[in-house]
Image: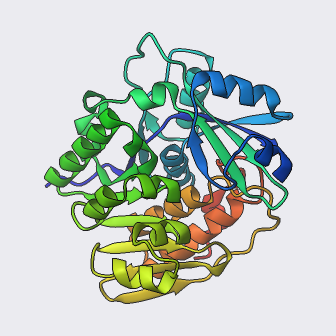
Amino acid sequence: MTEPTLDVVALGNAIVDVLSDADDAFLASRDLAKGGMQLIDQEQATALYGAMGPGVEHSGGSAANTAVGVAALGGRAGFIGRVQDDQLGEVFAHDIRAAGVRYDPPAAKPRPATARCLISVTPDAQRTMNTFLGAAAEIVPDDVDADLVASGAITYLEGYLWDQPLAKEAMRRATAIARDAGRQVAMSLSDSFCVDRHRAEFRELVEGPLDIVFANEDEIKALYETDDFATALEAVQGKVRLAVLTRSEKGCVIVAPDGVHEVPATPPTQLVDTTGAGDLFAAGFLAGITSGRSLTDSGRIGAMAAAEIISHYGARPETGLKQLVSGI
């Protein structure tokens, strides 16, 4: 087996985020589920964008954010995701390459447009996401670069993609390629509503081809249909090699073969926007374990990366993460 030339190869939605401040009344008036993510079509995206207040645009996408975070921490990362040959597609490709991530997008199709996520951020820093998947949802198994996947020590999958049948098959193909190359496979459960939609299949993945699963408290409880975190933790124990469970200000819990490891949260300098917190935590953890760090130290790197990302708007780092975690 050859040595990997990349630490992480991420497969996910290639999205440009549009963030705007909002209050609870704005969410209620449009029947938006606070703190969740729902899919919308292009017409709905246009209408919601017109109703939102002044916003800022950042390249995003959950797995793409993680790949950028790995690179910012000094790791070697690649990304697989589809954009359109349009302005936002050019923005996305430029941003992720400039961040040091290897990205060679599949040939563009005639339509639809590049994906965008409209994010309403309430004063409590909760983010409510409405996503037009556009071109991102058009990823198919043939878009998965086998050589790129095989070059990564860990293939990281974004749970959101499971909503699209062909994208689901692309994820299965990436998993098979990684397995055949003797690599590890990790996946984020992405969202509790996403878990509700695909619970049975997600359980099969956790108990089957996955080596590492990332989930927040709501997601792991949704996976095992319980309101009690301790019950969910017990349910996942022994099902997958590593379950990395984040709990916001309560820190994270890493469920491993040698027991349960708890890592405290790193307080942010200021709490502005929680968009991307889980993505950057995953980046820190993956960067840690691929560089030979212990599970606990990898969790600490993840916590520090998450703290940086929630201290400002957007899901891409604004501070040198490598220097930030150099003391660990």
Residue at (81%, 34%) from the top-left corner?
A: 52
Q: Position of residue 254 (x, y in %)?
A: 44, 79
Residue 87 picture quarter: top right
Q: Left of 321 or right of it: where is 108?
A: left
Colour mode of the rendering = rainbow
Q: Residue at x 43, y 47 (%)?
A: 77
In the picture, residue 104 is in which quadrant?
A: top left
Residue 99 is at least partly visible in this image: yes
Of residues 167 and 12, the one drawn nearer to the viewer in this rendering: 167
Instruction: Please give the name of the residue rendered at 47% of the width and 24% of the height, measured from the top-left corner.
Output: 135
Q: Is residue 23 visible?
A: no
- Residue 112 x, y percent position in the rendering: 49, 17
Question: How many marks are shown on the rendered structure?
Answer: 0
Pick whichever, 33 or 258, lies toward us: 33
Task: Give the vertical position of 207 relative to 164 (above or below).
Answer: below
Looking at the rendered image, the quarter that the N terminus falls into is bottom left
Foreground residue, 24 or 146? 24
The x, y position of residue 138, in whole percent, is 39, 27
Front-most of residues 185 and 2: 185
Residue furthest to the top: 110
Q: Residue at x 65, y 49 (%)?
A: 315
Left or right of 265 in this view: 75 = left
| Position of the C terminus by quadrant | bottom right
x, y percent for residue 18: 71, 36
